[in-house]
Image (cartoon, coloured by chain):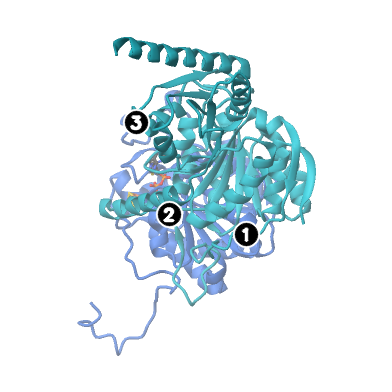
Chain colours: A cyan, B blue
């Protein structure tokens, strides 16, 4: 049975967590995502969830570690400065292979920065973030609907791989109100049982140990190899992206999250002017859709990456394009959201340059 | 060994509890950690709660506590054991949950997690090994190092002006309404061991009755870090640590003892 509601992104996410059977939430308030803990404090508790506002994000992520290690479906949420504090715990969680959901409603930084939306945490989210060789699986919603849907998916993927999953949103997605349809949550069939959880040792089995400590280098390397093999499986199976008018595009926009919404508008405006512009919107930021970029690079003449940061995902786009066509970047920082018009302006400039190139080529011929 | 030693005609007067694994302790000779492990696991056995107990190991010399304790265990990041224990307890409220932590773990890097778990009245048991030094990293100053104590980072002895005072976190925690049972013990004599065991049994009983947070500090030794023989270490501990960290109950059944007030004001 599905239900349609008008909600803020943060609230939709919280509601979806309850519906997905999340058993515990541990968090610390920070703008622009405090609605998550507030919503859960009322709705979640009433519906049987453990919901704790605790002393710090450091404590919160370690409670997630403990509760996830005890086999419970649990989550936390925060915004950039709080997510920085959680990096220690995330590294331990990744190594101990504990499934859980972390939500980062990204705000502008560095430092205390601004409470306005940003995509400045892309590197931190996708490249590890804490110490050691590990990855979170990162989902980037672009609507209130996806803020909810990706909670269902995030929990399932986390369980499937015994890996922490991050939803990387931003302040605008957290705060905006949109219609959201809550489908009935049915767990994916592949959700494995958790025989490894520390729930108390019956006489019939050896004790379970949740740890990230492997003092012998050979043993540690075996663990590393295991993690890398898992990330390989994740790369093979979990890549998600959306293509908009990409078939005949000459200029390809690449953007995720809020920037991708703006870029959709840009595609529309450009097409009205007869300019063949398309959009690739990565949905999983780790694993990253390099292959489709490679494929597209055979057909397009240039790429414009649009981000709300100084240029982070653009590095991955360059890896995917691998020098085949020029890759441009347009970004706003500090919590400023780029307008469709300014991006369009940039796109038109690129077409001019492309045409120039054609002229030059003709001339030389 | 057992093959060559004729055991058949001997009467068994001591056995390690089967709640301890067969793995040999890696602790230095004379170190208190091993005794505390054994007593803790004896209590778990006597109470018959092995299958319902989850332990949390710290970062410190007892980082491998889960090699020895035959219960489900989690290894916490340095200082975060109280938070990890909270996470476990909140989703498994009917199970027994304890953390086992050193003074650096509990009273330096993990101070916030420690105090807040106590203040919430988290229904867990915290075993706190106070050896006044960082054993694992090679004998640096701990928050509980006593005034004048020589460590590798206080070669001239800990001085108040630059390093502050020995941190009596147990007294601090006893003051919190969430703390139900707070006691300071040692394990350097048979009597002390018996008293410690009673404390552990009492704390697990309190947890069963959902009374709230229990803290057992064990004033312990670190012969290696202190650079003393085990016998001298225990003597040094009695003479120098007990005056700063007096043995006894600070809070029982949620009520502060008389002693608590005199001790806090005296030191
Ligand atoms: C974040 C972090 N900082 C520092 C360390 C290094 N470290 C390991 S154990 C330890 C101190 C342990 O001392 P204590 O808690 O008193 O336990 P003991 O070894 O004396 O039993 C330190 C500083 C670490 N593992 N993690
Ligand atoms: S270094 Fe100290 S605390 Fe660590 S095992 Fe040796 S004696 Fe015990």
Indicate if the residue with disc 3 has its beta carbon within 8 Å of ligand 1. no
Disc 2 beta carbon < 8 A from ligand 1?
no
Chain of the residue where label 2 is placed in the rendered structure: A
Closer to the camera in the image, A64 or B199: A64
Q: Where does label 3 land, which residue?
A: A322
The chain carrying label 3 is A
Task: Determine the CA span between mark 1 and mark 3.
Answer: 38 Å
Q: Is residue A290 left or right of residue A331?
A: left
Query: Residue at left 47%, top 63%?
Result: B193
Secondary structure, mark 3, is loop
Q: In which quarter of the image is the C terminus of chain A?
A: top left
The mark nearer the N terminus, 1 or 3, is: 1
- Identify residue for label 2: A211
Mark 2 or mark 3, whichever is nearer to me: 3
Discs 2, 1 touching: Cβ within 8 Å = no
User: Which quadrant of the view contains residue B36?
Assistant: bottom left
Q: Position of residue A85 (x, y in %)?
A: 52, 34
> Which residue is denoted by mark 1 in the rendering?
A187
Q: How far apart are marks 2 and 3 (CA)?
A: 39 Å
Q: At which x and y percent is residue A80?
A: 56, 30
Cα distance in 3D space between marks 2 and 1:
27 Å
Say few, some or many: other residues with alpha carbon within 10 Å of mark 2 (under 14 / 14 to 19 / 20 or more). Answer: many
- Residue at 46% x, 29% y: name it: A313
Earlier-in-chain disc, 2 versus 1: 1
Q: In this view, does B139 lie above or below A50?
A: above
* Vertical arrangement, residue B45 with respect to residue A273, above or below: below
For ligand 1, give the image quadrant. top left
Of residues B33 and A256, which is closer to you in this image?
A: A256
């Amino acid at each position: 049975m599905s239900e349609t509601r008008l909600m803020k992104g943060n609230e939709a996410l919280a509601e979806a967590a309850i519906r997905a059977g999340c058993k515990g939430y541990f968090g610390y308030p920070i703008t622009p995502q405090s609605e998550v803990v507030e919503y859960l404090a009322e709705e979640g508790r009433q519906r049987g969830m453990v919901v704790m506002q605790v002393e710090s994000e450091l404590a919160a992520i370690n409670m997630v570690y403990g509760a996830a290690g005890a086999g419970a479906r649990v989550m936390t949420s925060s915004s950039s400065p709080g997510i920085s504090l959680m990096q220690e715990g995330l590294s331990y969680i990744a190594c101990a292979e504990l499934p859980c959901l972390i939500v980062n409603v990204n705000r502008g930084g560095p430092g205390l920065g601004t409470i306005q939306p940003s995509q400045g945490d892309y590197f931190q989210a996708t490249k590890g973030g804490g110490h050691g060789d590990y990855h979170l699986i990162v989902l980037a919603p672009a609507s209130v609907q996806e803020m909810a849907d990706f909670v269902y998916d995030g929990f399932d993927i986390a369980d499937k791989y015994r890996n922490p999953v991050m939803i990387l949103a931003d302040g605008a997605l957290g705060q905006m109100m949109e219609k959201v349809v809550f489908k009935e949550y049915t767990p994916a069939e592949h959700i494995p049982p958790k025989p490894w959880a520390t729930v108390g040792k019956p006489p019939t089995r050896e004790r379970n140990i949740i740890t990230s400590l492997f003092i012998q280098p050979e043993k540690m390397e075996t663990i590393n190899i295991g993690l890398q093999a898992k990330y390989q499986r994740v790369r093979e199976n979990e890549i998600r992206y959306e293509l908009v008018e990409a078939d005949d595009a000459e200029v390809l926009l690449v953007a995720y999250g809020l920037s991708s919404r703006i870029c959709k508008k840009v595609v529309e405006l450009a097409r009205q002017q007869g300019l063949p512009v398309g959009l690739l919107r990565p949905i999983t930021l780790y694993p990253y859709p390099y292959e489709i970029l490679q494929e597209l690079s055979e057909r397009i003449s240039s790429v414009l990456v649009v981000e709300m940061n100084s240029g982070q995902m653009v590095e991955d786009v360059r890896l995917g394009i691998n020098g085949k066509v020029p890759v441009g970047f347009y970004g706003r920082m500090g919590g400023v959201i780029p307008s469709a018009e300014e991006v369009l302006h940039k796109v038109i400039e690129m077409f001019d340059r492309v045409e120039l190139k054609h002229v030059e080529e003709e001339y030389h011929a | 060994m057992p093959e060559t030693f004729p055991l058949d005609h001997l009467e068994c007067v001591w056995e390690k509890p089967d709640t301890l694994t067969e793995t040999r302790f890696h602790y230095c000779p004379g170190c208190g950690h091993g005794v505390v492990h054994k007593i803790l696991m004896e209590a778990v056995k006597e109470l018959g709660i092995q299958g319902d107990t989850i332990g949390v190991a710290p970062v410190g010399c007892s980082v491998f506590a889960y090699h020895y304790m035959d219960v489900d265990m989690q290894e916490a990041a340095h200082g975060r054991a109280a938070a990890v224990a909270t996470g476990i307890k909140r989703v498994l409220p009917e199970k027994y949950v304890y953390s086992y932590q050193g003074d650096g773990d509990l009273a330096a890097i993990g101070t916030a997690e420690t105090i807040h778990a106590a203040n919430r009245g988290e229904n867990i048991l915290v075993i706190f090994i106070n050896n006044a030094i960082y054993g694992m990293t090679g004998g640096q100053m701990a928050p509980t190092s006593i005034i004048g104590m020589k460590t590798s980072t206080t070669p001239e002895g800990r001085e108040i002006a630059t390093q502050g005072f020995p941190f009596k976190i147990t007294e601090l925690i006893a003051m919190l309404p969430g703390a139900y049972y707070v006691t300071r013990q040692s394990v350097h004599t048979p009597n002390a061991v018996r008293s410690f065991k009673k404390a552990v049994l009492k704390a697990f009983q309190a947890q069963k009755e959902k009374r709230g947070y229990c803290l057992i500090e064990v004033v312990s030794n670190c012969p290696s870090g202190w650079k003393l023989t085990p016998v001298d270490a225990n003597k040094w501990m009695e003479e120098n640590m007990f005056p700063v960290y007096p043995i006894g109950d600070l809070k029982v059944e949620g009520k502060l003892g008389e002693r608590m007030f005199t001790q806090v004001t005296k030191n």
